[in-house]
Image: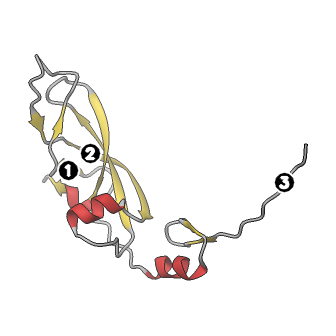
């Protein structure tokens, strides 16, 4: 049996930590701006996207609700998921964003749950 060692050089964006095989692509990623944080840990927010509680469904009647909760952690800056970006803004991501982890109590089943949202999916509650 032979041991084969393969050397690979990767370039990492110093902003979001994404690895690239091409130096110019990594530099392009680093040049993208960082969105300003709109929320902080502890802020009360409501989701703009409705969710469905599968554990509280009765006879397959799924009722939507918009979670209300508190931000308990912030991830980023990072590049957003392309599917999310296309859905919201169209085209490829043009900036680094933050991901907000929200803890909320499900109004349907009463369980405490967590979900992650981008800034455009949340609205601050006063």
Viewer can see residue 39: no
Q: Give whichever of 25, 100 is nearer the camera.
A: 25
Label 2 – label 3 distance at C-alpha: 50 Å
Q: Give whichever of 60, 56 is nearer the camera.
A: 60
Residue underneath mark 2: 70
Question: Is residue 85 found left or right of 7 in the rendered image?
Answer: left
Seen in the picture, residue 29 relative to 109 is either above or below; the reply is below
Single out the residue that lies furthest toward the top. 59
Q: Earlier in the sequence, mark 1 or mark 2?
A: 1
Question: Is residue 33 found left or right of 4 in the rendered image?
Answer: left
Q: Which picture quadrant has residue 95?
A: bottom left
Q: Which picture quadrant has residue 98?
A: bottom left
Viewer can see residue 29: yes
Please state the horizontal and vertical placement of residue 24, each as a whole percent of the image. 55, 83
Q: Earlier in the sequence, mark 2 or mark 3?
A: 3
Seen in the picture, residue 32 relative to 20 is either above or below; the reply is below
Label 3 – label 1 distance at C-alpha: 52 Å
Residue underneath mark 1: 45
User: Mark 2 packing: few (<14 Cα in 10 Å), some, or many (20+)?
Assistant: many
Q: Give whichever of 86, 105 is nearer the camera.
A: 86
Q: Which mark is residue 4?
A: 3
Question: Is residue 123 found left or right of 15 in the rendered image?
Answer: left
Q: Nearer the viewer, mark 2 or mark 3?
A: 3
Q: Earlier in the sequence, mark 3 or mark 1?
A: 3
Task: Tell me the SS state at disc 3.
Answer: loop
Query: Circles 1 and 2: CB distance less than 8 Å?
Result: yes
Label 1 – label 2 distance at C-alpha: 6 Å
Please state the horizontal and vertical placement of residue 44, each as a whole percent of the image. 21, 49
The residue located at (33%, 72%) in the rendering is 92
């Amino acid at each position: 049996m032979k041991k084969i060692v393969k050397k690979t050089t990767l370039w990492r964006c110093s902003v979001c930590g994404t690895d690239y095989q091409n130096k110019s692509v990594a530099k392009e990623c680093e040049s993208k701006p960082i969105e300003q944080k709109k929320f902080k840990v502890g802020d009360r927010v409501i989701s703009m996207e409705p969710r469905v509680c599968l554990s509280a469904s009765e006879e397959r009647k799924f009722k939507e609700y918009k979670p209300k909760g508190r931000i308990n952690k912030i991830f980023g800056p990072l590049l957003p998921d392309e599917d999310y970006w296309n859905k919201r803004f169209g085209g490829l991501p043009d900036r680094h964003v933050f991901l907000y982890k929200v803890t909320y109590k499900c109004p349907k089943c009463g369980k405490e749950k967590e979900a992650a949202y981008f800034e455009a999916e949340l609205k601050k509650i006063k």
